[in-house]
Image: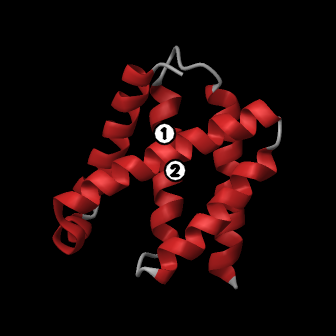
Amino acid sequence: MKSEQLNKIIEKVVEGIYKDYPEILERFGERGKQKCFEDNEHHFRHLETALNMNNNQFFIDYALWLNNVLTSRGMKTEHLIDNFKRIDQVLLAETDFCNKESYQSMLSEAIEELYNIELI
């Protein structure tokens, strides 16, 4: 994974989140924006690890664990779903991102699991 390319992808994701959810910036400030960037780095690390392990469930388990952490801190499951959808959309536009289809598949599976939580 090229770090410059990855940083640009994450920047697009984070900028989109903060553009569409200005209340998050008001609530968490610039420190929250930096944390969001770091969280997305973690998302990609877990996607890469799951791919290397050939184990999509690893990423799904990470998503479910992270959702528990974030919701205990006042975030909503819909925010994590939105974040994963944004990653998927930015990857869709990338023409030369290695393993994007595998990442998109794992993101889709995780989103489905998170939707199931929302319905409970």
Secondary element under disc 1, as helix, strand or loop, is helix
Eyeballing the image, is 87 above or below 92?
below
Q: Residue at x 27, y 62 (%)?
A: 32
Q: Indicate the secondary structure of the residue bearing disc 2.
A: helix
Query: Is there CB contact under 8 Å for labels 2 and 1?
Result: yes
Residue 66 is situated, as x and y percent measured from the top left of the image, at 57, 65
Image x and y of residue 64, in percent: 66, 66
Residue at 50%, 78% (x, y): give it.
71
Q: In the image, what residue occupies the spot 64% across and 47% down?
A: 107
Tell me the amino acid under the disc marked 1.
Gln
Q: Which amino acid, mark 2?
A: Lys
Task: List x then y, in percent, for residue 81.
Answer: 53, 61
Return the residue nearer the eye: 21 or 52. 52
Q: How many C-alpha atoms fall within 10 Å of the one at disc 2: few (<14), some, or many (≥20)?
A: some
Label annotation for residue 4: none
Counting other residues with Cα less than 10 Å from the Cα at mark 1, is it few (<14), some (14-19), or many (20 or more)?
few
- Read off the residue under disc 2: 85
Q: Which residue is at 33% across, 56% downward?
A: 35
Q: Is 82 drawn above or below residue 28 in the view shown? A: above
Name the residue tied to disc 1.
89
- Taking depth in this image into account, of 102 and 43 the one nearest to the observer is 43
Q: Would you place residue 118 above or below residue 7 in this image?
A: below
How far apart marks 2 and 1 lie (CA) works out to 6 Å
Q: Position of residue 70 (x, y in %)?
A: 48, 72
